[in-house]
Amino acid sequence: MKLSKVKEILSTLNNVEFQLENGKFVPEHFHVTEIGIITKRFIDCGGNIRNEKVINFQLWDANDYEHRLKPAKLLNIISLCENKLDIEDSEIEVEYQSETIGKYDLDFNGNNFVLKNKQTACLANEACGIPEGKQNLKLSDLNNACCSPDSGCC
């Protein structure tokens, strides 16, 4: 989700709530401890140079039960970051502590922001020879396998 969409949604909410994909909620007394730009320049396994840029929100369970972050306050923090850091309308990545610091994509389910699990992936499948999707096999090809029901190997 891009920053512009987050701002649009925040302007319609009474409370800011984040939920993990498994249904568990980030405690309502969380703090946004950082908003920034993360730039990653790397070479994938196919030798391609790549650049990624995301806006990072870091959430922290502060055990501060007296404060709740309201949408207007988060919009003010975002505005400050846009002005001071020249933040563009980019995708949001959220950092949140579970067993270790997790990185999540951001979505909205109509009521809450949802921290979507991120997955690693090969970015150069064609260079690595990794087949895309499920491979289809012919049953007739399997009959020539080294192990057959009457071979005694099973």
Image: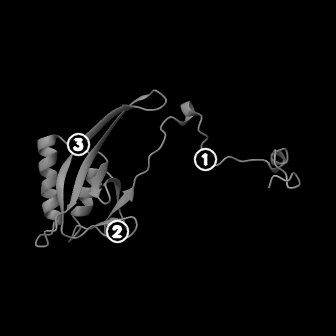
Q: Position of residue 10 (x, y in %)?
A: 23, 62
Look at label 1 and name its amino acid: Gly
Residue on which disc 2 sits? 110
Q: Which residue is at the front of the view, 142 or 70?
A: 142
Instruction: Give the foreground label among 2 and 3.
Output: 3
Q: Separation of disc 3 and disc 1 at Cα? A: 33 Å
Taking the spot 11% from the left edge, 70% from the top edge, the residue there is 67
Q: Position of residue 120 (x, y in %)?
A: 44, 46
Q: Exactly how many numbered labels are in the figure?
A: 3
Q: Residue lying furthest right in this view?
A: 150
Residue on which disc 3 sits? 37
Residue 60, picture quadrant: bottom left
Is the residue 63 above or below the residue 84 in the image? Answer: below
Dot 2 or dot 1: first in sequence order is 2
Q: Position of residue 92 (x, y in %)?
A: 30, 50
Q: Residue lying furthest front in this view?
A: 152
Residue on which disc 1 sits? 133
